[in-house]
């Protein structure tokens, strides 16, 4: 499938093909839900998604797996080195580091604002020193860089039927919803790393603090106050999904099944957390494989319908969407209009400190 995707995207340079393949492997290994949903996109757009998520996964691992970088100090050095390569790669459109090379190529092809990548690195750096967030607004500041910008990066790749800026707030909200889902599912594992990604004021409203969470994690015992707080976090997350879902209608029809499938799969994680009695401090909530398969089958059916409709519309002389025309893929470009915005990538600004 990798060769077909790269050919469809018009990626012919051997070194660049190898770089995109490395990103695809990172996405497949670390992001099962994202990877499954990405398979529903047109082949020409998948390499760009793999580049975006592969880079994010790689940077995140520098923070979450300090044993591979000789501890927190090593993680800081590794992030510094990665950020230098990132800035240089975005500036020149190339890099000796394969993952950065693919990312820089994707940013250039789809005119993705460089600030999104710099903001992402700022949040990765925050993970080295910040261990909790007093309020939801504080947490949102962190999540802008760690999650919302991922949604913003994806918009030009997915394509829209409206000006890009109309779809961006919904895409950012969906990024937040996905990350809040991860925070709830992984609360026990994050606690073991010394971090709490649930707002302190939300926990305190139900009589919960770090000490109580640590006690429950260490003893395996439950406390109704924790269950109530985790249920509140679940409700908060579902509210963010409700804010994001209307944005699906603004996406290119052939991209909607991919994002809808990701929404359903991630919503399934919330369902699994609730069905397991919000016991995330003691075990990881898992969506049953049969349920994941059913969602994937439904997504495939929607993809087939969307592509048939796009072909019929194209034969009638009306473009199927306002999505991106991928360089080097003339048949694909013929079916799609140019993006609403055709701007040159901006020079990266200085990284903000957090």
Image (spheres, rainbow, N blue to C red):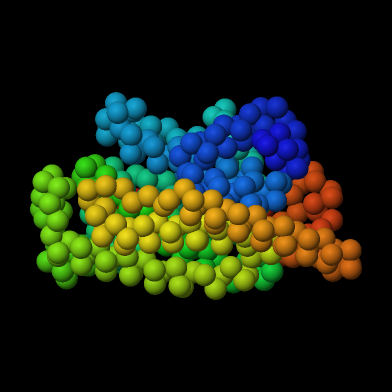
Instruction: Tell me what residue is drawn at x 29 percent, y 57 percent.
Output: 276
Q: Quadrant of the N terminus?
A: top right
Q: Is residue 214 visible?
A: no
Instruction: Tell me what residue is drawn at x 54 percent, y 73 percent.
Output: 246
Is 336 left or right of 280, judged from the image as shown? right
Name the one closer to the observer, 342 or 32.
32
Quarter where residue 250 is shown = bottom right
Name the one closer to the observer, 199 or 238.
238
Instruction: Tell me what residue is drawn at x 17 percent, y 61 percent.
Output: 226
Is 6 left or right of 95, judged from the image as shown? right
> In the figure, 56 relative to 303: above or below?
above
Estimate the x, y position of residue 121 in percent, counting from the top left. 42, 46
> In the figure, 248 relative to 335: above or below?
below
> In the figure, 117 relative to 264: above or below?
above
Q: Is residue 318 visible?
A: yes
Instruction: Tell me what residue is drawn at x 67 percent, y 71 percent.
Output: 162
Estimate the x, y position of residue 309 in percent, counting from the top left. 78, 65
Quarter where residue 257 is shown = bottom right
Residue that protrudes farthest toward the front in the picture: 290
> In the figure, 325 relative to 83: above or below?
below
Estimate the x, y position of residue 10 in percent, counting from the top left. 76, 40
Is 98 left or right of 228, judged from the image as shown? right
Name the one closer to the observer, 346 or 165.
165
Estimate the x, y position of residue 343 in percent, counting from the top left. 68, 57
Q: Please count the marks in the image.
A: 0
């Amino acid at each position: 499938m990798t060769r077909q995707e790269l050919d469809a995207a018009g990626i012919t340079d051997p070194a660049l093909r190898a770089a995109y393949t490395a990103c695809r492997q990172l996405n497949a290994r670390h992001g099962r839900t994202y990877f499954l949903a990405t398979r529903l996109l047109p082949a020409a757009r998948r390499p760009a998604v793999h580049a975006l998520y592969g880079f994010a996964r790689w940077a995140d691992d520098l923070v979450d797996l300090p044993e591979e970088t000789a501890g927190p100090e090593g993680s800081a050095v590794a992030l510094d080195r990665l950020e230098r390569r990132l800035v240089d790669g975005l500036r020149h459109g190339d890099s000796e580091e394969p993952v950065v090379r693919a990312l820089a190529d994707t940013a250039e092809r789809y005119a993705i604002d460089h600030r999104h990548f710099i903001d992402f690195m700022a949040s990765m750096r925050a993970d080295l020193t910040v261990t909790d967030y007093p309020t939801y607004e504080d947490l949102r500041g962190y999540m802008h860089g760690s999650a919302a910008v991922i949604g913003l990066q994806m918009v030009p790749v997915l394509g829209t039927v409206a000006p890009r800026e109309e779809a961006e707030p919904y895409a950012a909200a969906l990024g937040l919803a996905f990350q809040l889902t991860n925070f709830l599912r992984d609360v026990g594992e994050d606690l073991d790393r010394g971090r709490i990604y649930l707002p302190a004021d939300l926990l305190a409203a139900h009589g919960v603090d770090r000490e109580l969470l640590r006690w429950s994690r260490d003893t395996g015992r439950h406390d109704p106050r924790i269950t109530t707080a985790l249920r509140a976090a679940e409700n908060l997350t579902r509210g963010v999904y409700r804010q994001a879902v209307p944005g699906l209608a603004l996406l290119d029809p052939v991209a909607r099944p991919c994002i809808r499938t990701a929404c359903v799969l991630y919503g399934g994680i919330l369902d699994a957390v609730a069905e397991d009695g919000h016991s995330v401090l003691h075990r990881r909530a898992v969506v049953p494989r049969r349920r994941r398969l059913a969602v994937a089958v439904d997504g495939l059916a929607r993809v087939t319908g969307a592509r048939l409709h796009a072909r019929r519309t194209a034969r009638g002389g009306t473009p199927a969407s306002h999505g991106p025309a991928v360089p080097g893929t003339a048949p694909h470009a013929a079916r799609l209009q140019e993006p609403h915005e055709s701007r040159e990538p901006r020079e990266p600004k200085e990284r903000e400190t957090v």
